[in-house]
Amino acid sequence: MASIIPRPRSGGCRKPGDALVKATLDAMQREPLSVEAVAHVARLARLELSKERIDAYRTQLAGVLEHVAKVNAIAVDGVEPMAYPFETSNRLAEDEIAPPMPLDDLLMNAPATEGRFLAVPRVLAEGD
C-alpha cells in the first residue's frame, strides 16, 4: 500500500503534514473559511459553540491559518534542524571530595523529624 504522507524533501526540515497544510491554505485562498468548517473543527475539538461564537472564531482561525501560511512560505532548504535556537554546552564541574554537610543542617530543612531521623507517614500497617 502506498503511503499518503509525502516524503520530506532532502536538505529541508519540512514535516509530513506540510502537504495537508498547503492544501488547506490553497483552498482558503479560493474561498474564505466557511462556518461549516469552523463548526467541524469545533466538533473535532469537542467544543459546543453558538452561532455567534462560530463567527468570532471563524475570523480568528482564518488569521491563524494565514500566519501558518506565512511561516510555511519561509525557505528552509539547507537549514539543519536543531533542538535549541542557541548554542549549548554542558558545564561539567570537577568532582571534589568534601566533608558531608552536618546532619543538624540537613535536618533543619525537613518538615518533621524524630531524633536524628526524618519522620514520614507510615506506609505499611503492622503485621504486613
Image: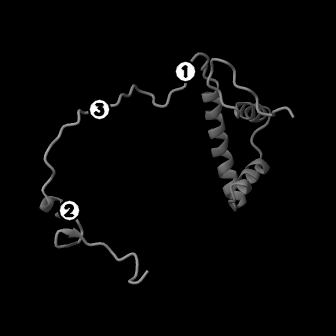
Q: Residue at x 68, y 55 (%)?
A: 45
Q: Position of residue 93 (x, y in %)?
A: 25, 33
Quick one: 91 or 103, which is closer to the camera? 103
At mark 1, the secondary structure is loop
Amino acid at dot 3? Leu
Q: Label 1 crowding class (10 Å Cα cut-off): few <14, some 14-19, many 20+? A: few
Foreground label between 3 and 1: 3
Q: Position of residue 113 (x, y in %)?
A: 21, 71
Q: Which residue is mark 1?
A: 80
Q: Which residue is mark 2?
A: 109
Quick one: 112 or 85, which is closer to the camera? 112
Amino acid at dot 1? Glu
Rendered view: 102 above or below 123: above
Q: Which residue is mark 3?
A: 92
* Separation (CA) of disc 2 from disc 3: 27 Å
Which image quarter: residue 108?
A: bottom left
